[in-house]
Amino acid sequence: MIRTIVCAFSKDEMPADDVQIFRRFEASVARGGWNIRVRFDPIEALPERYDVLVVNAPYKERAEAIESDVILIVTTRATVGPACEQLMREIERGDVLTAERRDPNAPKIVKHRGIEIL
């Protein structure tokens, strides 16, 4: 059961491509209506629990060195579309990977910051 996807970046570099990878996964999960949290965390300080780790190609060796039984997706800004679509298709199929659908009737949580609604 997939509950959390972490898109990782490095604290040592400007994460421009990594932000685009995160945004693509975040949008695909929202569009699919899945109850999956998509996080954007540094590869040096990953959370304790996550199910899928998505990294940009330059971080492949660092991600493989992390001993974990999570699904590792290595992609680039140019190939993130097909990689994301493949993961969503596998979740939709439900053979190996599964996830819960978001309840469409659940209350929407809105965050306020100053006069701007996020």
Image (cartoon, rainbow, N blue to C red):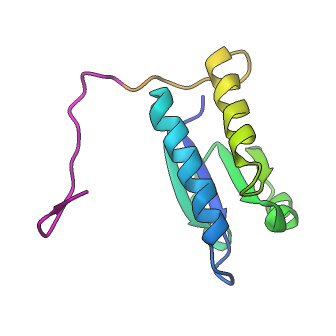
In the rendered image of this protein, does residue 36 appear above or below residue 96?
Answer: below
Q: Which residues are magenta?
A: 103-118
Residue furthest left as drawn: 115
Q: Magenta span has 63?
A: no
Figure quadrant of residue 86: top right
Figure quadrant of residue 43: bottom right
User: Count the marks: how many?
Assistant: 0
- Residue 75 rendering spot, x and y as whole percentages: 78, 52
Query: Quarter of the image containing the C terminus?
Result: bottom left
**Secondary structure that dominates the magenta span:** loop
- Residue 50 rendering spot, x and y as whole percentages: 60, 47
Q: Nearer the viewer, residue 11 or 70?
A: 11
- Residue 85 rendering spot, x and y as whole percentages: 68, 33
**Quick check: 57 left or right of 102?**
right
Residue drawn at 60 percent across, 28 percent down: 1
Residue drawn at 11 percent across, 66 percent down: 115
